[in-house]
Amino acid sequence: MTKFEIEVEEFKKAFPNTNMKIALYGTGRFTATLLQYAKDYHFVGLLDRDSALVGTELYGLKVLSRAEAEEQADIIVINTQESYWKSIYERVKDWNIAIYYRNGQKATLDTYRDYEQNPYWQKSLKTLEDKILSYQIISFDIFDTLLMRKIFYEIDVLKFTELKIKARFNIDFDFVSIRKQAASALEEPSIDEIYNQMRSLTSLSDDMLEQIKQCEIQTDLSLTCSRRDIIALCKKAQKTKDVYFVSDMYYPKEVLQQFLKKAGIATRLSHIISSCDVKRSKALGTLWSYYKKHIARTKSALHIGDSSTADCTMAEQNGIDSFYIMSAKTMLENSSLHSLSSHITSLYASIVTGLITCNVFNSPFALNKTKGHIFFCDESLAGYCLFGSILYSFILYLIDATSKASYDVLLFFGRDGYFFIRAYKYFCKHFKSKFTTAKYLEISRKAVMCASIRTTDDIKEVLAFPFNGSVSSLLHKRFGLSLTYKTASHAEQEELSNIFPKYKDQILARAEYERKNYLKYLHSKTKRSAHIAVIDSWYYGNNQYYLGKLLQKRLDGFYLCCSKESTNICAQSQNMSSCFAPDCALYKNAIFCESVFTSPQGMFLYIDALGIKHREGKKQNQRYFSVRKEMIKGSLRFFKELIYMQKSITKDKSLLHAPLNDRGFSDELFGAFMKDGACLCDDIKNKFFYDNGLLGTKETKIF
């Protein structure tokens, strides 16, 4: 029997009732095969993680929405590779419909949540290294074992390639669908055979198909990185052992040799065994019988791979011992970050998760000591994972939102804007398009509040903000008055309204002094008539509100997230736009974010007549500023990698429609890390503090 016939027979045994109305989750090769050979079943439609496919037709069936599936189907069958089952089930577990895996097992919440108990955590690199010594022949799986991709789902390599094809060759070509269809008609096909099959499905010339094939190979090659521990172990084994490379793959050995060479592994073609070359499969065991007969023979042999079935069970059934190591994908699903997998529904999400797993799960033993828990002891890596995607989505949002209004300048508010403007400029310098000029503006609520005071009512408005401290401290911090006044008791605080008429003239005079000097500084940044927009982190927009009062005009403001409720006076008098929703995970962790997005200097207070900027003394967040600097370096390293991908599929003029962006996932990712997904080590945690100079002088540790 062929592989296809075996798969269909297994499905028929698992689901003997052909009258059930079935929705198949998965639009890949398994589904293409099943629909071709199981004509007697009542398949009502397909399901896919990509919401853009809903309503379209694949293999003659409609891709359904959740509501349609719940209404039309009796059951959902997750019809994909087993490695995807958990993440797909997490995605649909709350749907009002029975869910099964393609082997007939009813999908339920399983024990993977108890990831700390996984027996895999007992393994180590040393265990594997010692085991290799006992065998004459060693073989390695290639993808997900020696190499990993900067993309979470393998199918997304094709989706990314499709975007490259459209950008490079300027053709509108449904590459992914046609390539899937071509591969599904063949058994253990090579990439050449797949493209030969594609000739009958398209009107493209042979020359164009060859260019597309090379684009696919080069794209995949560019997306791979080495799993450093296993590569080093492989190279060490090559010095004393006969080492082979065995892969279920559509790349022939000549192409696989290129991938190994990129990873620094030199080997003869005779030591690379690809399923497409020998027309046998690891997953079915036929390749292992070939390997045993023609290569291992009577010698002791050990195979190392990431599939418990194809690399281990099937190898052992054919007399080849095995050692299982986790792929980065499986590590994520068995880690403290496991909840994230169900949210990886876009190409952007797949790429971002791939980039992160290449850094966090590069070693298959990275989580063994912590039993699946992720710990950040490196500030740069923490910044890469926590804030890289958030900042990237924010900068794309800013470019999109501000370019439509033809602003003369974007004013990035201090101190939050200290890193924002660096991220904006870092992004812009990599593209040839003309972007709005960005400038950093020294500002604080204290400085702009005081400068905006013109009347007694303005004084009362500033006093409405709560303050924890003495009256003299309040006079100094809110209005810049250095007056001696005894520490206020609760009763004295209640009578502030009686005290402040006494200081009204001093307050107004001081406000006029600060206003004159601040306006001079502001107009050195931008012309009085300039069309400006302001950039800040969040939430109520007080700095924008008081700057608008100072300039006596309505301003446009762009935020990470902001409140546009009718109760927010700032949003009613100013134009405020938000990148993320008000209830986003980012804002739920606002105190931590504020302690990261700060500048190395103390809070800005005012500018004197000589143009000298006066500030508060440095606080703990400034004393430990090097931690934040390293975190932003990590974020920019993420920028560099994603910009490289973005540029390969985006013409500058179409940047505003950048296909690599998913704000919702960026926030989900941050939330997953912050909610039990990862921990900062104590040395890092102890360097983050909450302080608010407008409300008082106290500093408290965040963690």
Image (cartoon, rainbow, N blue to C red):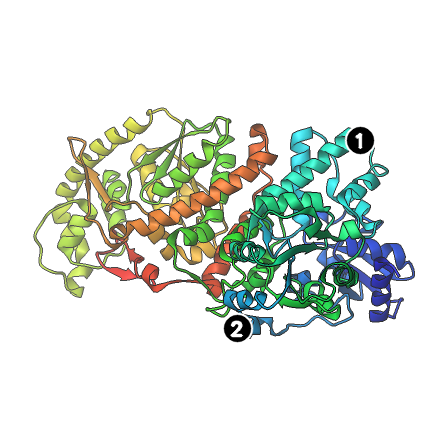
Q: At 87% from the left edge and 70% from the top edge, which residue is drawn?
A: 16
Label 1 and label 2: CA atoms lie apart by 52 Å
207 versus 472 height, above or below? above
Tell me the element at label 1: helix
27 versus 514 height, above or below? below
Left or right: residue 16 compared with residue 477: right
Q: Position of residue 645 (x, y in %)?
A: 56, 39
Dot 1 or dot 2, earlier in sequence: 2
Left or right: residue 693 compared with residue 577: left
Q: Which residue is mark 1?
A: 206
Tell me the element at label 2: helix
In the rendered image, is residue 212 in sight? yes
Mark 2: few/some/many CA within 10 Å (<14, 14-19, 20+) = few
Mark 1: few/some/many CA within 10 Å (<14, 14-19, 20+) = few
Left or right: residue 214 compared with residue 484: right
Q: Position of residue 546 (x, y in %)?
A: 31, 41
